[in-house]
Amino acid sequence: MKKIPVVLLPGLLEDADGFAHQVAGLADVAEIVVADLTQSDTIEGLARDALAQAGAPRIAIAGHSMGGYVALEIMRQAPERVSALALLNTNARPDSTESTENRRRLMALAERDFEAVITTLLPRVVAPAHLGDAAITATIAQMAHAVGREAFARQQKAIIGRIDSRPHLAKIRCPTLVLAARDDAIMPPALLEELAQGIAGATLAMVEASGHSAPLEQPEAVTDALHLWLTGEPRRGPDVVAGTRRPPPA
């Protein structure tokens, strides 16, 4: 079986470590690149960066959180290059006034105490049940330090400036997976439902017992969902993930 070229798009303060389980679990069906989304300060620039790193002319793309904003921008810039789309723990709306204010406060805090930013974000990006999981919280902290304060500021600026993607959803024609987490405090399931409803034929999958960091909190469920999205076949048995089967990407 020929492997499918896949580009994974990390979220805010995330890097390849956030997708470690998915990279390993999909290795038999996918040739995966995890994009570096730290260099530009606009979503448009981050999308161009990701496309430049893709390697293959035609790719499947999966974006987590901020990576989902980048994925939607890729669909505007180069839809002909995308064979399949997955949007994880993200939404199509522009930044709200409240969110922008919170981001600016965190950017100011980062200038004084970057460690405090990580401490502040942790309870928001994982479900309460996983705050005591040392492996998950250590990975989140390590990724944040690897991305660093300056890239954090660029990413936040990009997120603040993103457009409303809802008017563009109807133009998406490739097989699309939208993945929500039941206990996501940042991207509640209703936002993912709205996103899925805007894309013709999109499959909505729900990950239970997970907050915003679903690829880390419930790695098996996310990898199973992505395998089904990519191949049309379950990774382990017939009932490992909610949602209907989709054909493999063209």
Image (cartoon, rainbow, N blue to C red):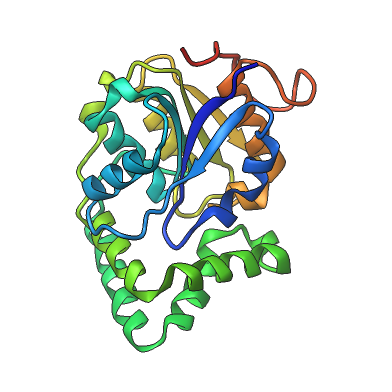
Q: Is residue 131 above or below residue 82?
A: below
Point out the residue furthest to the bottom here. 112
Q: Position of residue 242 (x, y in %)?
A: 64, 25
Q: Position of residue 107 (x, y in %)?
A: 30, 75
Residue 242 appears left or right of 42: right
Q: Is residue 145 above or below residue 222?
A: below
Say whether residue 243 is visible.
no
Instruction: Report the quarter where the N terminus lies.
Output: top right
Residue 194, picture quadrant:
top left
Residue at 64 percent across and 70 percent down: it is 138
Residue 56, picture quadrant:
top left
Say whether residue 103 is visible.
yes
Residue in the foreground of this view, choosing between 123 and 49:
49
Point out the residue furthest to the right here. 237
Residue 92, picture quadrant:
top left
Residue 38 appears left or right of 96: right
Q: Position of residue 244 (x, y in %)?
A: 59, 15
Residue at 52 percent across and 35 percent down: it is 179
